[in-house]
Image: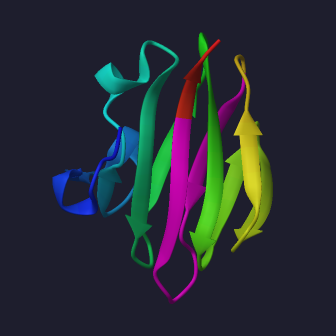
Amino acid sequence: MVIRKEAQRLQVRDNVRGGNGTLENRHIVEPDAMFGSATLFSEFFFDPGDSIGAHPHDNDAEVYYMLEGELVLIEDGVETVLKEGDASYAHSGVSHAIENRSDKPAKMLAVILKV
């Protein structure tokens, strides 16, 4: 299956999970095309000040992969700066948030896996 960029759905949301700003994300693969193995495969675009608020993962896990810029990951209260090429994995039972505290835009890939 090939999914052309022009066919991928763009979504714009304010205050994602209680975070700041307006985030745009591009759904690269829709959940129904992933046969129950994942619920999200998206590229997220963060302007300075944008964030995704703290949220838990109870019956799933999430991978973040930095494509461009830098974001601050807050995982169970610990802050880590993620830069291009860095990845994080939040397994079931972990809570995390992510923020763009820089003065430049940032992009990341996010995948939520069923566990």
Residue 84 occupies which quadrant of the picture? Answer: bottom right
The residue at 64%/56% (across/down) is: 65
Q: Quadrant of the N terminus?
A: top left
Residue 92 in percent (x, y) is at 70, 18
* Residue in the image at 58% along x and 24% along y: 113
Q: Nearer the viewer, residue 69 or 51?
A: 69
Tell me which segment is drawn in magenta. Answer: 94-111
Residue that protrudes farthest toward the front in the picture:
1
Magenta residues: mostly which secondary structure? Answer: strand
Magenta-colored stretch includes residue 96? yes
Q: Is residue 106 above or below residue 52?
A: below
x and y, in percent, of residue 37 in the image: 52, 17
**Residue 94: percent from the left, percent from the top?**
72, 26
Quadrant occupied by the C terminus: top right
* 79 or 63: nearer the viewer: 63
Q: Is residue 27 left or right of residue 12?
A: right
**Image location of residue 5, percent across then percent down:** 27, 61
Image quarter for residue 80? bottom right
